[in-house]
Image (cartoon, coloured by chain):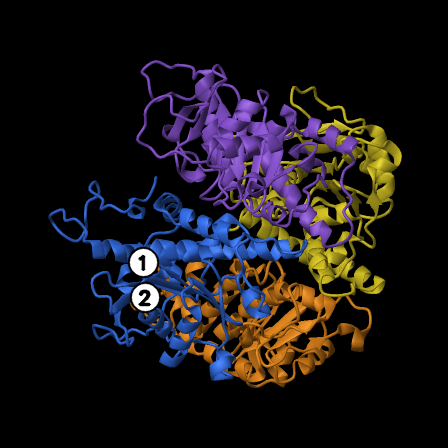
Chain colours: A blue, B purple, C yellow, D orange
Amino acid sequence: MLDRRGLDRPNDDEPTTSKATTAMPTSLEILLNDLVMASRILAAEDIVDSFGHVSVRHPERSDRFFISRVRAAELVTREDIVELEMDCSPVRPTQERLFAERVLHAAVYRLRPDVKSVCHHHAPSVLPFCVSGVALVPVIHLGATMGAAVPFWDSRDEFGDTNLLVATEEQGLSMARSLGPYWTLLLRRHGATVAGRTIRECVFRSVYGARNAQVQWRAMQMGPLQPLTPGEACAAEDFNLTPIAVDRTWERWCHRTSQPA
Amino acid sequence: MLDRRGLDRPNDDEPTTSKATTAMPTSLEILLNDLVMASRILAAEDIVDSFGHVSVRHPERSDRFFISRVRAAELVTREDIVELEMDCSPVRPTQERLFAERVLHAAVYRLRPDVKSVCHHHAPSVLPFCVSGVALVPVIHLGATMGAAVPFWDSRDEFGDTNLLVATEEQGLSMARSLGPYWTLLLRRHGATVAGRTIRECVFRSVYGARNAQVQWRAMQMGPLQPLTPGEACAAEDFNLTPIAVDRTWERWCHRTSQPA
Amino acid sequence: MLDRRGLDRPNDDEPTTSKATTAMPTSLEILLNDLVMASRILAAEDIVDSFGHVSVRHPERSDRFFISRVRAAELVTREDIVELEMDCSPVRPTQERLFAERVLHAAVYRLRPDVKSVCHHHAPSVLPFCVSGVALVPVIHLGATMGAAVPFWDSRDEFGDTNLLVATEEQGLSMARSLGPYWTLLLRRHGATVAGRTIRECVFRSVYGARNAQVQWRAMQMGPLQPLTPGEACAAEDFNLTPIAVDRTWERWCHRTSQPA
Amino acid sequence: MLDRRGLDRPNDDEPTTSKATTAMPTSLEILLNDLVMASRILAAEDIVDSFGHVSVRHPERSDRFFISRVRAAELVTREDIVELEMDCSPVRPTQERLFAERVLHAAVYRLRPDVKSVCHHHAPSVLPFCVSGVALVPVIHLGATMGAAVPFWDSRDEFGDTNLLVATEEQGLSMARSLGPYWTLLLRRHGATVAGRTIRECVFRSVYGARNAQVQWRAMQMGPLQPLTPGEACAAEDFNLTPIAVDRTWERWCHRTSQPA
């Protein structure tokens, strides 16, 4: 049975549990449910493990965003989501621990008004590129959803020896400047930061960027790299980020992913 | 407990749910159940994910074929199957979205009367061959079921920069001409198209072609490739596509694969 | 809860289902239960898939052995086991299909009185060695259970182009001669044949031989191979085939493996 | 639902089963529950299989430690834990078989008063380094938790041809001397020994050391190795072993791991 929470529209055939009368979920509630599912999907698809996080910009207050408190992504529930200002302070006081790297999300939202969702991950197939410094390029059509280019950011360039986390506002802004107008950024010896115009797009780019990395690594053992042309990459990115492609995937991911209890 | 739907003959010890009297399923109903299971098996065996599809030619109307509407393969049910003309229009009007790449299936059926089933996939072990252009050859006896040769089709040759999908009749026919008399075709930077004389043969060729690709990739790291001789490949293909081999596998795949609810 | 069928001694706290009075299973019944579990364990550990089989010599009639009818290993039940003469004819007439490759088992039992169990498999980590012809050697202590050396058999040498199966008495005996006094044999472009002095030893050698192959393949990408010395291999084989090692593993494997319904 | 046994503090909302009155578990009981879960987590994370074990020093008697009897790690329960003196004799007489390699644990505790927990494993990603002798170095920030350096121990150097187990007091002490002041040691052709200041730290080092090995192996296929600087490694090790990182992971691991019945 397909989980209805995977669909865009509110469920009209499921009782709501919080009220006596049947109420439609607001668009914000739907968005935050998507954020919870995004977190769990990224874990189910091996993009994040105990580390890594995904956020979404507030749909009505572009100077705020939502992200979970410190918790492994596959365990996140609606109650773990906190609302943050762009200076990373919580809108409502909280005793919960917050990710040091929330500054990374804020920095991307600040420099890129077109970005509505950010994911930071250490997917195993992407890390060899972060270590070796070899460029990640689209080699299959679905991989083109990484975006037209995948730049690198090296914390050493501006900050020397660190623990490699993006933990200060300066580090966040430095990283976001390296992302520039693109959608996927590799952090040397650390992981990736991925942006999207929607949560689902951000998750799609994250998953298929990692799949592309796996194929590219294998293809590089076989001979010179023969990636997509810029024209192919642009057309494939456009097509594969349409709702017909993304929603089909989202339905399957929701089906495969455990729901909050 | 073995799922009886995996067997060739109708079930005479299971109640049918749609009628008051016990009716034997027609051969068409059995075939469409096989198509649903084929779709789910290909997902369970990691040949398809949210993308990729399998179809079957109508057994009595060779100018028609069956394929699911747009949906991830592991979720497909009998209700998702649509019947198409060879121009890819649905026999019965539908509001459902249809795969752009259904043209790929139609083109193979039009050029190859001997083909009764077609699968299109992006299996992770096959993609490095699609990217590198290295020839996929049978290196183990079960891999010989890919067929005597595995040609390539490159969308660039006739169509220049595209989004890499096979989305027009012309692209479908171009691809089908590259398949020629063979059974497995690699699409550069995209995936594979596999044909069979039955659904089960098509699924078998798809799965063991992907397994062969994995072994070949690993063996190529160890030294010069030592594939099967043409005589070995021909004998191994014949033997491994007999019912004794295919049905044993089909029984196991049905057992491992989730059934429609 | 540990499955008691994994233990050597009869269960005295489980009702038997075949008789009104509580009866101890005979040693033959225990052995055949082990054969069923061996088949399922080899599937659960990815040594066999829809193909591959394991057999055991009759404990009181050394001129007979037991093997399942044609069926994927993970589905085998007690009812699927048939008893065969050394000419591969069934002791009791049967309508069931039998493996063509049962001749392979018989040939090993005939040439090697010390062998009590035989496994034939196509484990994915072993196949690259079968294809490349690179020698499989013990590189870790548990891998030494493959035996002092792992020879090759190439069906081409005596039989030219075949479908690669070991399907005739002559092919079986040729293969068994290549095994010689050893315990693991690689069949070029096909798979492996493994022997043991008990079923559990045969399963252990099969599983850890495949694990060794995986490590060896990876280590060979990093530099010249540095295997165990003959003295180390001999001592490690002896130690790791003692009951203290094998039974610990068998308990875990039974726990992880689905039981017949 | 999160398993509360994954948390540091005693459960006050779960009935205890051993007494009529509700009693708080002692700190020792909590520690031994952690040891059981550590054993099962290491199995769930593919660090150990039927072989490999983890121990913890007695919190009040630094001359004693706890380890399971001979049993596959994923099956260990509280009843399997035995308490040993530093000469490896059991504090309470037992009929159970004990690991020959318990001497390895004792030797590390004897030479390293700062070590409170020891793990010995044969993780598949680490073994190629043990075979090839290539140095394992931190290439990602989480990998820095292996410690500042990862030395090798080769049983051949002092003991010549053995079965490769660390089975005598002399072998244990030789191995522990090779560990020196570090936290991770590779045993040539055998596996790894990992130490921690707590059980959770020991498990964390073991898991992310293995993850680092996987990334390093892949990165080495792509070009010259570009590891963390010593300054980065030191800062990353410190940060990633703080409770905020370790407890988040522990919560997830407990959630993913089967509990004793």
- The amino acid type, in three-letter code, at marker 1 is Leu
Q: Is residue D132 left or right of residue A240?
A: right
Locate the C terminus of chain D by quadrant: bottom left
| Crowd band around label 1 with a 10 angstrom C-alpha radius: few (<14), some (14–19), many (20+) | many
Residue C217 visible in the displayed image? yes
Specify the label residue C93 is tagged with.
none
Estimate the x, y position of residue B236 in percent, counting from the top left.
72, 31
Q: Type of residue at label 2?
A: Ser
Rendered location of residue B14, percent (x, y): 42, 22
Q: Are marks 1 and 2 in contact (CB under 8 Å)?
A: yes
Q: Position of residue C153 (x, y in %)?
A: 83, 42
The image shows residue B201, relative to residue A189, as above or below, that is: above
Q: What count of labels does the image hold?
A: 2
Label 2 CA crowd tier, 10 Å (few <14, some 14–19, many 20+): many
* Residue wearing tag 2: A68
Identify the subunit bearing mark 1: A
Q: Is residue A260 left or right of residue C130?
A: left
Residue sitting at x 73%, y 24%: C90
Give the quarter of the figure containing the N terminus of chain D.
bottom left
Secondary structure at badge 2 equals: strand
Where is mark 1, residue-wise?
A35
